[in-house]
Image: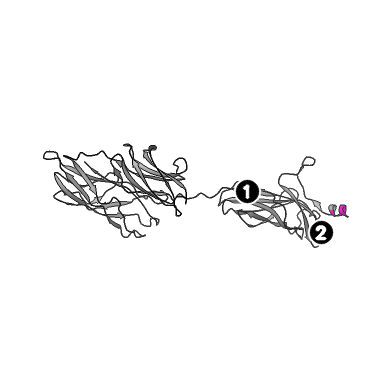
Amino acid sequence: MAVLAATAGGALGAPAAADGETPPGRVEFPTHCLPDAEGPTAARIEVDDPAPRAGDTVTVTYRLDRTPLPPPAEGALPAPTGRILLGGAQTGEVPVAAAGGSGGAVMKGSFVVTGGGPITLTPGGYALAGAACAAAGPSAPVAARLTVAPLPLMNLRGLALGASYGEPGARVRVTGAGFTPGAAVTVAGRAGAAGTADRAAATADRSGAFTAELVVADPGTTGVVAYEGAAWSAERGARPEAYTVVEPVPAVGSLTMTQAGAAITLGAVGYGGAAGAAGRIGTVTVVDTRGPGAGRWTLRGRLTGFTGADGAPVPGASLSWNPVCGGGCGAGPAGAVGAEGAVLASGEGGRFTVDAPVTLRLPAYTRPGAYRATLTLTLS
């Protein structure tokens, strides 16, 4: 009886193989076919891309090398159809249909990869020569596997400095957000693209935020970074925030300035770009005790470009100001600040206060989000 059942089916053109060797990717499983046939099915599943990325379309081929049914006559209708079962990181089924080929039943289909992780492909039921066949058990063995690269994660780490300049040895308050909750964070000075010896350690809280105090002693420091791991990287670190080390000014016969708060918080900009975001710089106090003949002083501003949370620049961003100077100094002209810089005020001898309302205008329909830039004031 066993011999008769085995010979009742048909080989559909299995590939040649060495004695005792199974063709790559082939699996066998017991099958029940309607109206009345039982026996083993030998099948293969092949993919055109074994390592796709999320969003890629993968073409799959379902080959029947042996079934419990007699081999169909050439050109017999209806044409073979079937399905492939997906498992692991992506579930569902892929319908396949006859795709021609020399010998046997060859069916093809395709599906779109939806996410990262391993995916298994298992032969499902099929229809051949007018009969419907399915695995006579829980399921057939897995015949193929895909390795899908995980989706890239957006780096949302960011920093804010309590001051953008200071004398050597100044203590700078550093706050961060978007880090891995509970992660050890290193805060460090930067001199261009290189790191400095200035370091501070912090631990991100449950929301991924931290606060640290960094002593900036290196006179060559141009920025501050924070990162997870052994060294800064674009994937696990916050982009540098600009910082300037200024030389101390003698207390007698000096030209000094102080500012009431370095941060400028702007309001919202209309999505259509119809209105600008308004704000005001912290009041700057300039004291010139150098005496007669020391010459005039000039207070200038320079603005970096605005960037979003993902680090992408915002084209065409424009911050303009309207300087106001008290105490007898001359206010600079109203207009855009920009990377080239603009004069905020100038004068000589005495004590002066300088203010400036500011307005930011972005291109119409700029992607919603929070944007940051650094405004540097220089007194000379």
| Figure check: 230 above or below 330 | above
Task: Give amino acid for label 1.
Answer: Leu
Query: Which color scheme does this rendered protein use?
Result: one colour
Mark 2, secondary structure of its residue: strand
Q: Earlier in the sequence, mark 1 or mark 2?
A: 2
C-alpha gap between disc 1 and disc 2: 33 Å
Q: Looking at the rendering, which quadrant does residue 302 occupy?
A: top left
Percent from the top left, x then y, of residue 97?
69, 56
Taking depth in this image into account, of 294 and 309 the one nearest to the observer is 294
Mark 1, secondary structure of its residue: strand
Count of numbered badges drawn on the protein: 2
Camera-nearest label, 1 or 2: 1
Q: Residue 249: which disc?
A: none
Where does the N terminus fall, quadrant-wise? bottom right
Where does the C terminus fall, quadrant-wise? top left
Is residue 3 on the magenta stretch?
A: yes
Q: State which region is magenta.
A: 1-5
Q: Label 1 crowding class (10 Å Cα cut-off): few <14, some 14-19, many 20+?
A: some
Is residue 14 on the magenta stretch?
A: no
Residue behind mark 1 = 146
**Direction from residue 300 to residue 372 in the image, left or right:** right
Give the residue at the far bottom of this rendering.
35
Give the residue at the far left of this rendering.
292
Taking depth in this image into account, of 181 and 45 the one nearest to the observer is 181
Examine the residues drawn in magenta and state their main secondary structure.
helix
Task: Give amino acid for label 2.
Answer: Ala
Percent from the top left, x then y, of residue 199?
39, 41
Q: Label 2 crowding class (10 Å Cα cut-off): few <14, some 14-19, many 20+?
A: some
Percent from the top left, x then y, of residue 348?
14, 44
Taking depth in this image into account, of 271 and 106 the one nearest to the observer is 271
Taking depth in this image into account, of 241 and 62 the one nearest to the observer is 241
Residue behind mark 2 = 37
